[in-house]
Protein backbone atom coordinates (compact mmCIF):
# COMPACT_ATOMS: atom_id res chain seq x y z
CA UNK A 1 0.00 0.00 0.00
CA UNK A 2 1.22 3.48 -0.90
CA UNK A 3 -0.04 6.79 0.53
CA UNK A 4 0.43 9.94 -1.57
CA UNK A 5 -1.07 13.38 -2.14
CA UNK A 6 -3.99 13.39 -4.56
CA UNK A 7 -3.69 15.11 -7.93
CA UNK A 8 -6.37 16.61 -10.21
CA UNK A 9 -5.95 13.53 -12.45
CA UNK A 10 -7.35 11.42 -9.56
CA UNK A 11 -10.72 13.19 -9.72
CA UNK A 12 -12.66 10.38 -11.45
CA UNK A 13 -11.27 7.73 -9.10
CA UNK A 14 -12.04 9.87 -6.02
CA UNK A 15 -15.66 10.38 -7.09
CA UNK A 16 -16.08 6.68 -7.89
CA UNK A 17 -14.72 5.64 -4.46
CA UNK A 18 -16.94 8.18 -2.70
CA UNK A 19 -20.03 6.85 -4.47
CA UNK A 20 -19.14 3.25 -3.59
CA UNK A 21 -18.50 4.02 0.07
CA UNK A 22 -21.40 6.30 1.00
CA UNK A 23 -25.12 6.36 0.31
CA UNK A 24 -25.53 9.92 1.61
CA UNK A 25 -23.42 12.90 2.73
CA UNK A 26 -21.21 12.41 -0.33
CA UNK A 27 -18.59 14.83 -1.58
CA UNK A 28 -19.66 15.82 -5.09
CA UNK A 29 -17.44 15.99 -8.17
CA UNK A 30 -17.61 19.78 -8.02
CA UNK A 31 -16.57 19.79 -4.35
CA UNK A 32 -13.66 17.43 -5.04
CA UNK A 33 -12.49 19.66 -7.88
CA UNK A 34 -12.64 22.67 -5.57
CA UNK A 35 -10.77 20.84 -2.79
CA UNK A 36 -8.04 19.69 -5.16
CA UNK A 37 -7.30 23.28 -6.15
CA UNK A 38 -7.85 25.24 -2.92
CA UNK A 39 -4.80 26.26 -0.91
CA UNK A 40 -6.22 25.49 2.56
CA UNK A 41 -7.02 21.79 1.97
CA UNK A 42 -5.01 18.61 1.43
CA UNK A 43 -6.20 15.32 -0.10
CA UNK A 44 -4.43 11.99 0.30
CA UNK A 45 -5.09 8.66 -1.39
CA UNK A 46 -4.10 5.10 -0.61
CA UNK A 47 -3.16 2.93 -3.58
CA UNK A 48 -2.55 -0.79 -3.95
CA UNK A 49 -1.50 -2.31 -7.27
CA UNK A 50 -2.32 1.04 -8.92
CA UNK A 51 -5.89 0.88 -7.59
CA UNK A 52 -7.29 3.65 -5.35
CA UNK A 53 -8.48 1.94 -2.16
CA UNK A 54 -8.78 4.90 0.23
CA UNK A 55 -8.97 8.69 0.42
CA UNK A 56 -8.83 11.40 3.08
CA UNK A 57 -9.76 15.09 2.97
CA UNK A 58 -8.00 17.46 5.37
CA UNK A 59 -9.07 21.11 5.82
CA UNK A 60 -6.88 23.87 7.22
CA UNK A 61 -8.62 26.68 9.08
CA UNK A 62 -7.52 30.05 7.72
CA UNK A 63 -5.67 32.20 10.21
CA UNK A 64 -5.75 29.64 13.03
CA UNK A 65 -3.69 26.58 13.91
CA UNK A 66 -6.44 23.98 13.57
CA UNK A 67 -6.79 21.20 11.01
CA UNK A 68 -10.04 19.38 10.42
CA UNK A 69 -10.26 15.82 9.18
CA UNK A 70 -13.26 16.21 6.91
CA UNK A 71 -13.73 12.81 5.31
CA UNK A 72 -12.25 9.30 5.04
CA UNK A 73 -13.34 6.72 2.48
CA UNK A 74 -11.99 3.15 2.28
CA UNK A 75 -13.00 0.58 -0.33
CA UNK A 76 -15.01 -2.29 1.14
CA UNK A 77 -12.44 -4.88 0.02
CA UNK A 78 -9.66 -2.99 1.85
CA UNK A 79 -11.35 -2.43 5.20
CA UNK A 80 -9.80 -3.84 8.35
CA UNK A 81 -6.31 -3.72 6.85
CA UNK A 82 -5.02 -0.47 8.36
CA UNK A 83 -5.79 1.77 5.38
CA UNK A 84 -7.74 4.38 7.38
CA UNK A 85 -5.13 4.45 10.13
CA UNK A 86 -2.32 4.97 7.61
CA UNK A 87 -4.24 7.83 5.98
CA UNK A 88 -4.88 9.49 9.35
CA UNK A 89 -1.23 9.22 10.37
CA UNK A 90 -0.19 10.81 7.06
CA UNK A 91 -2.74 13.58 7.62
CA UNK A 92 -1.39 14.24 11.12
CA UNK A 93 2.14 14.53 9.73
CA UNK A 94 0.96 16.98 7.09
CA UNK A 95 -1.05 19.02 9.61
CA UNK A 96 1.96 19.35 11.93
CA UNK A 97 4.15 20.32 8.94
CA UNK A 98 1.60 23.08 8.29
CA UNK A 99 2.08 24.20 11.93
CA UNK A 100 -1.36 23.08 13.10
CA UNK A 101 -1.70 22.44 16.81
CA UNK A 102 -4.94 20.44 16.81
CA UNK A 103 -6.69 17.94 14.59
CA UNK A 104 -10.47 17.86 14.92
CA UNK A 105 -13.22 15.76 13.36
CA UNK A 106 -16.76 14.50 13.70
CA UNK A 107 -17.76 10.80 13.80
CA UNK A 108 -21.21 9.29 13.47
CA UNK A 109 -22.32 7.95 16.84
CA UNK A 110 -23.16 4.59 15.23
CA UNK A 111 -19.73 4.23 13.56
CA UNK A 112 -18.19 2.13 16.30
CA UNK A 113 -15.17 1.00 14.27
CA UNK A 114 -14.12 4.60 13.53
CA UNK A 115 -14.70 5.61 17.16
CA UNK A 116 -12.46 2.78 18.32
CA UNK A 117 -9.72 3.62 15.81
CA UNK A 118 -9.57 7.31 16.64
CA UNK A 119 -9.64 6.74 20.38
CA UNK A 120 -6.78 4.25 19.95
CA UNK A 121 -4.89 6.96 18.03
CA UNK A 122 -5.22 9.33 21.01
CA UNK A 123 -8.24 11.42 20.02
CA UNK A 124 -10.45 12.60 22.86
CA UNK A 125 -14.19 13.15 22.74
CA UNK A 126 -15.18 16.68 23.74
CA UNK A 127 -18.71 17.27 22.50
CA UNK A 128 -21.52 16.25 20.20
CA UNK A 129 -23.68 17.61 17.38
CA UNK A 130 -27.37 16.72 17.15
CA UNK A 131 -28.77 15.69 13.77
CA UNK A 132 -25.44 16.42 12.10
CA UNK A 133 -25.72 14.00 9.18
CA UNK A 134 -28.26 13.94 6.33
CA UNK A 135 -30.14 11.05 7.97
CA UNK A 136 -30.25 13.05 11.24
CA UNK A 137 -27.71 10.80 12.98
CA UNK A 138 -25.82 12.60 15.75
CA UNK A 139 -22.05 13.09 15.67
CA UNK A 140 -19.35 12.93 18.33
CA UNK A 141 -16.68 15.65 18.27
CA UNK A 142 -13.08 14.53 18.68
CA UNK A 143 -9.74 16.33 18.82
CA UNK A 144 -6.06 15.54 19.27
CA UNK A 145 -3.07 17.75 20.09
CA UNK A 146 -0.50 16.99 17.40
CA UNK A 147 2.39 17.61 19.79
CA UNK A 148 2.26 15.99 23.22
CA UNK A 149 4.05 19.03 24.62
CA UNK A 150 0.98 21.17 23.97
CA UNK A 151 -0.87 21.43 27.25
CA UNK A 152 -2.98 24.59 27.08
CA UNK A 153 -4.37 26.22 30.17
CA UNK A 154 -7.95 26.56 29.05
CA UNK A 155 -10.72 28.38 30.87
CA UNK A 156 -14.04 26.67 30.18
CA UNK A 157 -15.59 29.43 28.09
CA UNK A 158 -19.09 28.41 26.96
CA UNK A 159 -19.48 29.02 23.24
CA UNK A 160 -22.24 31.21 21.84
CA UNK A 161 -22.81 31.77 18.12
CA UNK A 162 -23.63 35.26 16.92
CA UNK A 163 -27.00 35.25 15.18
CA UNK A 164 -26.42 38.38 13.07
CA UNK A 165 -23.38 39.54 11.15
CA UNK A 166 -22.93 42.63 13.34
CA UNK A 167 -23.34 41.07 16.82
CA UNK A 168 -19.91 39.49 17.38
CA UNK A 169 -19.25 41.86 20.30
CA UNK A 170 -22.47 41.06 22.20
CA UNK A 171 -21.95 37.34 21.53
CA UNK A 172 -18.49 37.63 23.11
CA UNK A 173 -19.97 39.42 26.13
CA UNK A 174 -22.41 36.53 26.57
CA UNK A 175 -19.53 34.03 26.53
CA UNK A 176 -17.54 36.10 29.02
CA UNK A 177 -20.46 36.64 31.39
CA UNK A 178 -21.46 32.98 31.33
CA UNK A 179 -17.85 32.01 32.08
CA UNK A 180 -17.88 34.18 35.20
CA UNK A 181 -21.48 33.37 36.13
CA UNK A 182 -22.57 29.90 34.89
CA UNK A 183 -26.15 30.57 36.00
CA UNK A 184 -26.55 33.28 33.37
CA UNK A 185 -28.85 32.19 30.55
CA UNK A 186 -27.77 33.20 27.02
CA UNK A 187 -30.44 34.16 24.53
CA UNK A 188 -30.90 36.01 21.29
CA UNK A 189 -32.95 38.60 23.13
CA UNK A 190 -29.98 39.32 25.42
CA UNK A 191 -27.65 39.41 22.40
CA UNK A 192 -29.78 42.13 20.76
CA UNK A 193 -30.15 44.12 23.99
CA UNK A 194 -26.38 44.14 24.40
CA UNK A 195 -25.97 45.22 20.77
CA UNK A 196 -28.39 48.14 21.20
CA UNK A 197 -26.54 49.31 24.31
CA UNK A 198 -23.04 48.88 22.92
CA UNK A 199 -23.33 50.11 19.32
CA UNK A 200 -21.15 53.10 18.57
CA UNK A 201 -20.00 52.51 15.03
CA UNK A 202 -21.50 53.15 11.61
CA UNK A 203 -20.07 50.70 9.12
CA UNK A 204 -19.72 51.65 5.45
CA UNK A 205 -23.03 49.88 4.87
CA UNK A 206 -25.60 48.11 6.99
CA UNK A 207 -26.11 48.34 10.73
CA UNK A 208 -23.60 49.47 13.32
CA UNK A 209 -21.02 47.51 15.26
CA UNK A 210 -19.76 47.69 18.82
CA UNK A 211 -16.66 49.40 20.18
CA UNK A 212 -14.82 48.80 23.46
CA UNK A 213 -16.56 51.61 25.36
CA UNK A 214 -20.04 50.34 24.58
CA UNK A 215 -19.12 46.75 25.40
CA UNK A 216 -17.60 47.76 28.74
CA UNK A 217 -20.69 49.77 29.70
CA UNK A 218 -23.09 47.00 28.69
CA UNK A 219 -21.30 44.35 30.74
CA UNK A 220 -20.89 46.74 33.72
CA UNK A 221 -24.66 47.29 33.82
CA UNK A 222 -25.08 43.55 34.32
CA UNK A 223 -22.96 43.32 37.44
CA UNK A 224 -19.48 42.70 36.05
CA UNK A 225 -16.32 44.79 36.18
CA UNK A 226 -14.62 45.88 32.97
CA UNK A 227 -11.26 47.39 32.12
CA UNK A 228 -10.55 48.94 28.72
CA UNK A 229 -7.22 48.86 26.89
CA UNK A 230 -7.03 50.82 23.66
CA UNK A 231 -4.02 52.31 21.85
CA UNK A 232 -5.97 55.17 20.21
CA UNK A 233 -7.68 57.82 22.37
CA UNK A 234 -9.61 59.14 19.36
CA UNK A 235 -13.00 58.12 17.98
CA UNK A 236 -12.90 54.37 17.49
CA UNK A 237 -12.87 53.15 13.86
CA UNK A 238 -14.01 56.48 12.46
CA UNK A 239 -11.95 55.76 9.33
CA UNK A 240 -14.39 52.95 8.47
CA UNK A 241 -16.98 55.49 7.26
CA UNK A 242 -16.87 58.32 4.72
CA UNK A 243 -20.00 60.27 5.55
CA UNK A 244 -19.33 63.43 7.56
CA UNK A 245 -22.74 63.05 9.21
CA UNK A 246 -21.98 59.51 10.34
CA UNK A 247 -18.58 60.57 11.66
CA UNK A 248 -20.29 63.28 13.71
CA UNK A 249 -22.79 60.79 15.14
CA UNK A 250 -19.99 58.38 16.07
CA UNK A 251 -18.06 61.12 17.84
CA UNK A 252 -21.12 62.26 19.81
CA UNK A 253 -22.09 58.73 20.85
CA UNK A 254 -18.56 57.91 21.96
CA UNK A 255 -18.23 61.17 23.88
CA UNK A 256 -21.42 60.35 25.77
CA UNK A 257 -20.13 56.88 26.58
CA UNK A 258 -16.77 58.25 27.74
CA UNK A 259 -18.56 60.62 30.12
CA UNK A 260 -20.54 57.71 31.61
CA UNK A 261 -17.36 55.63 31.89
CA UNK A 262 -15.63 58.42 33.84
CA UNK A 263 -18.63 58.79 36.14
CA UNK A 264 -18.78 55.04 36.84
CA UNK A 265 -15.03 54.70 37.17
CA UNK A 266 -14.33 52.05 34.51
CA UNK A 267 -10.53 52.08 34.00
CA UNK A 268 -9.37 53.15 30.52
CA UNK A 269 -5.75 52.52 29.55
CA UNK A 270 -4.45 54.17 26.39
CA UNK A 271 -1.78 51.57 25.79
CA UNK A 272 -1.17 48.18 24.17
CA UNK A 273 -1.85 44.99 26.11
CA UNK A 274 0.63 42.53 24.59
CA UNK A 275 0.20 38.76 24.74
CA UNK A 276 2.29 38.39 27.92
CA UNK A 277 0.19 41.00 29.78
CA UNK A 278 -2.97 39.48 28.30
CA UNK A 279 -1.93 36.07 29.62
CA UNK A 280 -1.20 37.53 33.07
CA UNK A 281 -4.68 39.11 33.18
CA UNK A 282 -6.19 35.79 32.10
CA UNK A 283 -4.31 33.99 34.91
CA UNK A 284 -5.75 36.51 37.40
CA UNK A 285 -9.28 35.48 36.38
CA UNK A 286 -10.15 38.06 33.71
CA UNK A 287 -11.92 37.02 30.52
CA UNK A 288 -10.35 39.03 27.65
CA UNK A 289 -12.57 40.15 24.77
CA UNK A 290 -10.20 41.15 21.96
CA UNK A 291 -10.70 43.07 18.73
CA UNK A 292 -9.11 41.42 15.69
CA UNK A 293 -9.07 42.00 11.97
CA UNK A 294 -11.02 39.23 10.24
CA UNK A 295 -8.82 39.45 7.13
CA UNK A 296 -6.41 36.66 8.10
CA UNK A 297 -9.20 34.27 9.08
CA UNK A 298 -12.14 35.14 6.80
CA UNK A 299 -10.51 37.24 4.10
CA UNK A 300 -12.77 40.18 4.96
CA UNK A 301 -11.64 43.66 5.97
CA UNK A 302 -13.84 44.11 9.00
CA UNK A 303 -13.36 44.42 12.78
CA UNK A 304 -14.31 41.33 14.73
CA UNK A 305 -14.47 40.46 18.45
CA UNK A 306 -13.31 37.12 19.93
CA UNK A 307 -12.93 35.76 23.48
CA UNK A 308 -9.57 34.45 24.70
CA UNK A 309 -10.10 31.00 26.22
CA UNK A 310 -6.56 29.86 27.00
CA UNK A 311 -2.80 29.91 26.47
CA UNK A 312 0.14 27.60 26.11
CA UNK A 313 3.78 28.10 25.16
CA UNK A 314 3.04 28.38 21.45
CA UNK A 315 -0.57 29.46 21.04
CA UNK A 316 -3.35 31.78 22.14
CA UNK A 317 -6.73 30.00 22.12
CA UNK A 318 -9.95 31.86 21.31
CA UNK A 319 -13.68 31.25 21.06
CA UNK A 320 -14.99 32.86 17.88
CA UNK A 321 -18.74 33.58 17.75
CA UNK A 322 -18.71 33.31 13.93
CA UNK A 323 -18.89 30.05 11.94
CA UNK A 324 -17.87 30.18 8.28
CA UNK A 325 -20.45 27.73 6.94
CA UNK A 326 -19.55 28.63 3.35
CA UNK A 327 -16.14 27.03 3.94
CA UNK A 328 -17.65 23.85 5.38
CA UNK A 329 -16.92 24.81 8.98
CA UNK A 330 -19.06 23.89 11.99
CA UNK A 331 -19.15 25.06 15.59
CA UNK A 332 -16.29 22.66 16.34
CA UNK A 333 -13.99 24.93 14.31
CA UNK A 334 -14.83 28.03 16.40
CA UNK A 335 -14.19 26.65 19.91
CA UNK A 336 -10.72 27.01 21.48
CA UNK A 337 -9.19 27.98 18.13
CA UNK A 338 -5.36 27.90 18.48
CA UNK A 339 -3.57 30.91 16.97
CA UNK A 340 0.22 31.26 17.02
CA UNK A 341 1.33 33.96 19.44
CA UNK A 342 3.10 36.04 16.79
CA UNK A 343 0.18 35.60 14.41
CA UNK A 344 -2.25 36.64 17.14
CA UNK A 345 -0.34 39.88 17.77
CA UNK A 346 -0.56 40.66 14.05
CA UNK A 347 -4.23 39.73 13.92
CA UNK A 348 -5.17 41.84 16.97
CA UNK A 349 -4.81 45.07 14.95
CA UNK A 350 -7.48 46.68 12.82
CA UNK A 351 -7.37 49.28 10.07
CA UNK A 352 -4.65 51.49 8.67
CA UNK A 353 -3.88 52.91 12.11
CA UNK A 354 -3.49 49.46 13.65
CA UNK A 355 -6.20 49.89 16.30
CA UNK A 356 -5.65 47.53 19.24
CA UNK A 357 -8.43 47.10 21.75
CA UNK A 358 -9.15 44.72 24.63
CA UNK A 359 -11.95 44.65 27.22
CA UNK A 360 -11.02 42.66 30.34
CA UNK A 361 -14.13 41.36 32.11
CA UNK A 362 -14.05 40.15 35.72
CA UNK A 363 -16.41 39.42 38.58
CA UNK A 364 -17.73 42.52 40.37
CA UNK A 365 -15.47 43.22 43.32
CA UNK A 366 -17.71 45.61 45.26
CA UNK A 367 -20.53 43.14 45.92
Image (cartoon, rainbow, N blue to C red):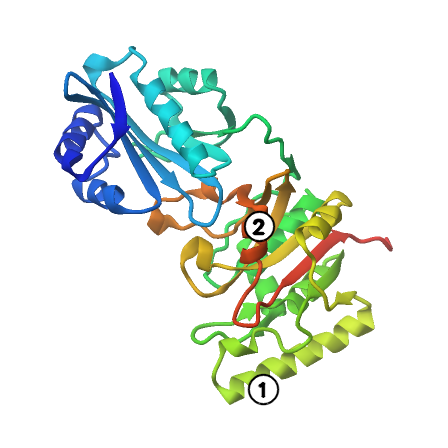
Identify the residue shown where x is 55% and y is 57%: 346
Which residue corresponds to mark 1?
A: 248
Which of 288/88 is in front? 88
Identify the residue shown where x is 70% and y is 58%: 273
Placement of 287 over or under 353, stated as above or below: above
Residue 326's spot in the image, x, y percent?
34, 51
Q: Quadrant of residue 210?
A: bottom right
Identify the residue shown where x is 63% and y is 78%: 235
Q: CA distance from mark 1 to mark 2?
A: 36 Å
Identify the residue shown where x is 26% and y is 34%: 25
Which residue corresponds to mark 2?
A: 342
Give the numbered dot on residue 167.
Answer: none
Looking at the figure, which quarter contains the N terminus?
Answer: top left
Placement of 202 over or under 141, stated as above or below: below
Residue 230's spot in the image, x, y percent?
68, 66
Which of 101/337 is in front? 101
Instruction: Name the secondary structure under disc 1.
Output: helix
Residue 195's spot in the image, x, y percent?
57, 65
Which of 82/321 is in front? 82
Residue 360 visible in image: yes
Left or right of residue 11, residue 121 in this image: right
Residue 131 visible in image: no
Residue 305's spot in the image, x, y percent?
56, 58
- Extreme residue in the front direction: 97
Density class for disc 1 (Cα within 10 Å; few <14, some 14-19, many ≥20) is: few
Mark 1 or 2 closer to N-term? 1
Amino acid sequence: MHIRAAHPSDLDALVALENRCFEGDRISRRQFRHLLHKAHAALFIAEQHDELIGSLVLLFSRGTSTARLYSIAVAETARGKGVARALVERAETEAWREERALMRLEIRKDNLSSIGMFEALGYRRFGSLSGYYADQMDAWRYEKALDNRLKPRLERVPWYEQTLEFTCGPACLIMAMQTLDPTMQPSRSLELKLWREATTIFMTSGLGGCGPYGLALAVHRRGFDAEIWVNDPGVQMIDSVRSAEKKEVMALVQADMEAEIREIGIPVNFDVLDDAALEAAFDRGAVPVVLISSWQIYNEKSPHWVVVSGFDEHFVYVNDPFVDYDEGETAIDSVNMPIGRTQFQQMARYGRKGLQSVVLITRRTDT
